[in-house]
Image (cartoon, rainbow, N blue to C red):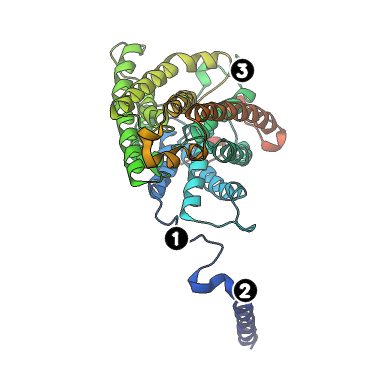
Amino acid sequence: MFVKRGLVNCGCVLRAVGDIAREIDTSRYQNGKDDEYGGDEDADIKGYEDTHVMIFIGFGFLMTFLKKYCYSALGFNWLLAALAIQWALLCQSFYHMKDNTILLTKKSLFEADVMSATVLITFGAVLGIASGAQLLFIALVEIAVGCLNLYIIGDIFKASDVGGSIGIHTFGAYFGLGVSTALRIKKGEVPEASRLDGPNYNSDITAMIGSIFLWIYWPSFNSALTVSPAEYQRAIINTYLSLAGATVTAFVVSSMVNHQKGKFDMVHIQNSTLAGGVAIGAVCNMFITPGIAIAIGIGAGILSVCGYRFLTPALEKIGIQDTCGVNNLHGMPGIYSGILSILFAALATSERYGPELPGIFAAMESGRTAGGQALYQLAALGVTLLLSFGTGVITGLLAKLPLFEPLKESDRYNDEINWELP
């Protein structure tokens, strides 16, 4: 009897809920359209699926090179990306609401995916030295500030940065270095013999999985927000050529500067081969010619390998740990791309670009000169550097509060702190 009465009551509740649902403002659903979702203008945006693979497989496996931190590299990458995408959907949309309503589209999902990359780049800088609670706090702050930065450089400055080299890669790298500066290890706190921040043969192989996925899908990442088919094709071609140039250069330069002359360093091959994708990002949709695209990749390969070989050890000597070398893969190539965008903006003419000019340099349609556009590109790069590093340091200092359970120096780079191991 009790079960029967319960079923009857449940049926009444369900009917009541159905009646309420039918009475909700039916104007929102006219013609099969719910106005919490956008229309079909962004439904065919390219690159979303490929970028999703980059975020969850590419970034995740790239960071499995640490011999005792593979669980955390993959697990925290998954957690941080899932959190960042949801938070970014809100933070980015605050600047573009229609009638105080956030409309979700495939484009907004893509942009949230891209914004999550800033968090994962920062994660690479502090990989193994920040606790799970610290990482979640860092992610929440970084997304909010990163979306503000994108609004400034994109909506106010109207800078061209289709591949996110300034707003995503540069921001994520120097925010991460700011956090790492605040969390820096004091000299002599951890004996060299007990440190776990190194690879083994198998972990380096799994990291190569991430590198290859990122390399393959990077043209989709850079070209997704292009406007015209011609611009899309140009971005694809330029990105691939830059990646190819960086890859060949990374192998050559690695064998030249390695401690063991004539041999390759796996760190360079895992990372510097990708630097061409970052370096070309801000200019991949511009009229730069294929030869220049390859040259940009060559420059990025040299810059990145030399950064890993000489600059990263120098930072470690002053206690700033950059575990994945994000300064060499994302930071310096991002600055390089920003400088290139200044140059190519200054050289842009209506005769050269024709009807494509407004799609690439939106403000030039309303009278901004090429020189003025170049200055705004410079401003975008400068603001990004200042905002990212400054807020990164502040966030890192706040993350050291006991509330966020900072890791002891002896617990860093160790999965056993957070995971039940087999």
**Image location of residue 12, percent across then percent down:** 63, 84
As rendered, which of 82 and 371 lies closer to the eye?
Answer: 371
**Image location of residue 172, percent across then percent down:** 53, 32
Q: In this view, does 258 lie above or below 378?
A: above
Q: Distance between the residues labelled 3 and 1?
A: 57 Å
Which image quadrant: the N terminus?
A: bottom right
Residue at 30% x, 36% y is 237
Q: Are marks 2 and 1 in contact (CB under 8 Å)?
A: no
Q: What residue type is labelled 2?
A: Asp
Residue farthest to the bottom?
A: 1
Which callout, 3 or 2, points at the residue further toward the start of the chain?
2
Q: Residue 189 carries which label?
A: 3
Mark whose residue sits in front, 3 or 1: 1
Mark whose residue sits in front, 3 or 2: 2
Residue 129 visible to the viewer: no
Q: Name the residue under label 1.
A: 40
Label 1 secondary element = loop
**Image location of residue 251, percent across then percent down:** 30, 21
Residue at 60% x, 14% y is 188
Q: Distance between the residues labelled 3 and 2?
A: 63 Å
Which callout, 2 or 1, points at the residue further toward the start of the chain?
2
Q: Crowding at label 1, few (<14), some or many (≥20) Cα neighbours within 10 Å?
A: few
**Image location of residue 67, percent across then percent down:** 44, 29
Q: Which amino acid does label 1 sit on?
A: Asp
Label 2 secondary element = loop
Q: Mark 2 points at which residue?
A: 25
Q: Which amino acid does label 3 sit on?
A: Glu
Q: Do the residues labelled 3 and 1 touch (CB within 8 Å)?
A: no
Label 3 secondary element = loop
